[in-house]
Image (cartoon, rainbow, N blue to C red):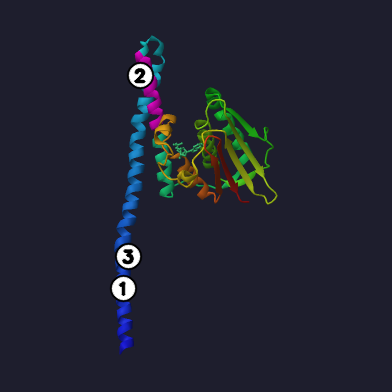
Amino acid sequence: MLFFFTIILLSIAIGLAYLFAGKVMVPLKKSYHQQVEFTTNASHELRTPLSVIHSSVELLEECKEALPEFEQHVLDGLKDEVTRMIRLVESLLTLARSDSKQWNFKLEAVDLGQISYETYQAMLPLALKKGVDIQIDPPTIDANTSVIQGNTDQLRQLIYILLDNAIKYTPPGGKVTIKYRVDTHSRTTLQVTDTGIGIPKDELSRIFERFYRVDKARSREFGGAGLGLSIAADILRSHQAFIHVTSEEGKGSVFEIAFEA
Ligand code: ADP
């Protein structure tokens, strides 16, 4: 009798647990999807007016010389802010796509050395403008030596984020190096090193969080929103790659990524 009573009680408990879990899970899941959908829609809606403002600012720039000095400064400020907002909206869209698993993720053979070299060349003017020395190692591409399975666009974006940060957080006169290697176990590594401001030890575990910036005032000054490394983390996850960061305040940082064969 006691046995049957226990069984009935247990069944009721399990049933209630399922019911309750279902009730809680469905709205949570729904609100998560709604949140992702909202971010996607809002970013899409913001894209068009921002592009219009950007084009108008570019048009005004053509006759900038004719403007009084004060208006020229206003125009420069406007251009910087619009560019920053466009970048922010693009980052939000990328993250929303990743969250909703809508990333068009096609795996293909990608030459990591080749895209490292292309991204390095694309970043050269930015580094030169800031007075930061930028080097790639090896300095010439040895085609097809570092081919991995991945997605070209995402990997390009990943390298761009790391190089952009390295240049951004390195004062003029400093150095940034991008290095790629294939080791004996067919593991390909990519390393971005800088001699910049560094990251405090207790903040290292948080830099991949969304909107996380070590020094908010300073990051804002550099134009960062705290989204670059969270996009990098999503790209790494989709490539089943690992990242290791070492850093020393005032000395610089090393971001090392390993892609398993
Ligand atoms: P942000 O767009 O603000 O640079 P990220 O997500 O790319 O955002 O980086 C998060 C934070 O990590 C940055 O705000 C910055 O404080 C720190 N950080 C990232 N890379 C570096 C680096 N190479 N040197 C120093 N600090 C860095």
- Compared with 242, 84 (above or below) is above
Q: Cβ of disc 3 within 8 Å of ligand 1?
A: no
The residue under label 3 is which amino acid type? Ala
Task: From the top left corner, tell me how far across and down residue 23 is, in percent.
Answer: 29, 63
| Nearer mark to the viewer, of 2 and 1 | 2
Instruction: State which tag comes first along the sequence, 3 or 2.
Output: 3
Mark 3 to mark 2: distance in Å? 55 Å
Q: Is residue 76 magenta?
A: yes
Position of residue 215 in the picture relative to residue 189 (left or right): left
Residue under the image location 35 percent in, 32 percent down: 48
Q: How many marks?
A: 3
Depth check, front residue: 65 or 245: 245
Give the distance between the C-alpha atoms of the residues marked 2 and 1, in whole angstroms. 65 Å
Point out which mark residue 74 bears.
2
How packed mark 2 is, by other alpha carbons closer than 10 Å (few <14, some 14-19, many 20 or more), is few
Where is mark 3, residue-wise? Answer: 21
Q: Which mark is residue 15?
A: 1
Q: Earlier in the sequence, mark 2 or mark 1?
A: 1
Residue 49 versus residue 88: which sits nearer the camera? 88
Question: Callout 2, which amino acid?
Answer: Val
Q: Is residue 26 above or below residue 15?
A: above
In the displayed structure, does residue 49 sit left or right of residue 173? left
Q: Position of residue 34 (x, y in %)?
A: 32, 49
Badge 1 amino acid: Gly
Q: Any mark on residue 29, and which? A: none
Q: Is residue 81 visible?
A: yes
Label 1 neighbour load within 10 Å: few <14, some 14-19, many 20+: few
Sequence-first disc among 3 and 1: 1
Which quadrant: the N terminus? bottom left
Q: Which residues are magenta?
A: 70-86
